[in-house]
Structures are given as C-alpha cells and as structure tokens.
Image (cartoon, helix red, strand yellow):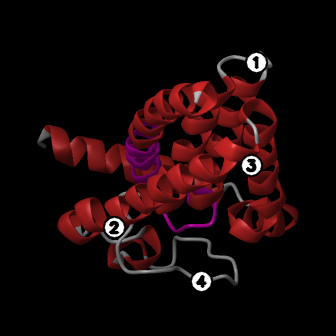
C-alpha cells in the first residue's frame, strides 16, 4: 500500500468515526453551525470591529479587501482543487454507500476536496487575527476555534472527509494571511493620509 493509499484509508477511518458518532440533538446543531446565515451577525460584527479600529474611511477599503479575499478563497477552492483533484464527497462515494449519516440538508456538489467552508472561514479568521493584531488576547484562539467548529460540522454532516477540511483550512489560512498583510499595509497608508 502506497503512502497516498494509507493516507486515504486513514482519512476514511477518521471520517467514519466522526460522522458515525452522531446524535439526533447534534444533527440540527451541526446543520446550523454549517449554515452561513447563522454567522451573518458575526460577519457584521467583524465589520464593526474594523470600523472601530481603523475608522469609517478605512471600512470601505477593509470591506473591499474582505470581498476580494473571499472570492480568492471560495473560487480558488473550487477551481484550483475541487475541479482539478475531483475527489468525491463521502456522501457520493459508492464504497461508503449506506455508511454515511446525512442530515436532511443533502450532500452538495459531487467533489469535496478542498472544503470551501473551511477555506472561507479560515481565511476570515486569519484576516481578522491580522487586523486585530493580538487585541484582545483571546480573539485569535476564539477565531480559530470558530473556524474549526465549522470544519468539524462539515465532517459530521457527511459532506467532507477530515482531509478535505484540513487542506481547506490550510489554503484559507494562507489566503487570509496574505490579505491580512495587504490590509495592514493599506491601513497604514489610509490611516496616515
């Protein structure tokens, strides 16, 4: 068995362990955690924090940068990974038929590597960590835990393998870090002018 085959087998085992540890009370909770609509107030709060930190003039630039970052994160996860790698989601994998616990939301698109939820939310988390610059101290840990919870929900719901969300998180963290650096440079110029 090659290294990649072993890695794939471990990924499937981890998926079945997480997805198989479901409970009726957790199904609705994980479905809510995975829904973007639930997080809209938090996204607005992030914009509020950026406005408070950098002012009204800078908010427009921050929002524009965030929008472009999400475009890179979201479309990149599809074009660079899903359409290229074409790894079936566990809920579409014929060898896992009957083993995947799905909630009523359904399965999603055919391919799952990498998770767009993971890449988008880790991009936002790393961007906000960079924008907040360690203040308050607990914010970085809270942002990482938030993005990780969303990743966990995707595996729990049966739509991604753990490897899908880990790779998506790494990709998103890279995108978020790059845009956080761009934001820092832009804010230095905007706030000074």
Q: Disc 3 versus disc 4: distance between alpha carbons?
A: 31 Å
In-front residue for pair 96/190: 190
Q: Disc 2 versus disc 4: distance between alpha carbons?
A: 19 Å
Q: Nearer the viewer, mark 2 or mark 4?
A: 2
- In the rendered view, tell whether residue 42 sits above or below residue 138: below
Q: In this view, does 95 lie to the left or right of 160?
A: left
| Magenta segment boundaries in residue numbering | 155-173
Q: Disc 3 versus disc 2: distance between alpha carbons?
A: 26 Å
- Asked if one can make out residue 115 in the rendered structure from this viewpoint, the answer is no
In percent of width and height, residue 192 lies at 59, 24
Q: Which mark is residue 47?
A: 3
| Label 3 vs 2, first from the N-terminus | 3
| Label 2 vs 4, first from the N-terminus | 2
Q: Residue 135 carries which label?
A: 1
Please name the residue shown 75% across and 26% down the image.
139
In percent of width and height, residue 43 lies at 74, 54
Q: Name the residue under label 2.
A: 78
């Amino acid at each position: 068995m090659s290294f990649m085959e072993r890695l794939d087998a471990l990924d499937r085992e981890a998926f079945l362990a997480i997805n198989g540890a479901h409970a009726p009370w957790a199904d609705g909770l994980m479905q809510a955690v995975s829904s973007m609509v639930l997080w809209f107030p938090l996204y607005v709060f992030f914009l509020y924090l950026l406005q408070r930190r950098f002012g009204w003039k800078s908010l427009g630039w921050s929002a524009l940068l965030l929008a472009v970052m999400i475009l890179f994160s979201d479309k990149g996860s599809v074009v660079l990974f899903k359409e290229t790698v074409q790894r079936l989601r566990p809920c579409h994998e014929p060898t896992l038929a009957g083993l995947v616990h799905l909630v009523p939301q359904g399965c999603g698109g055919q391919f799952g590597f990498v998770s767009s939820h993971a890449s988008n939310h880790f991009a936002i988390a790393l961007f906000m960590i960079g924008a907040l610059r360690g203040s308050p101290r607990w914010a970085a840990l809270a942002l990482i835990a938030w993005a990780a919870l969303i990743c966990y929900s995707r595996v729990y719901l049966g739509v991604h393998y753990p490897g899908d969300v880990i790779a998506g998180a790494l990709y998103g963290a890279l995108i978020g870090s790059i845009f956080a650096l761009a934001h820092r440079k832009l804010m230095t110029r905007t706030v000074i002018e």
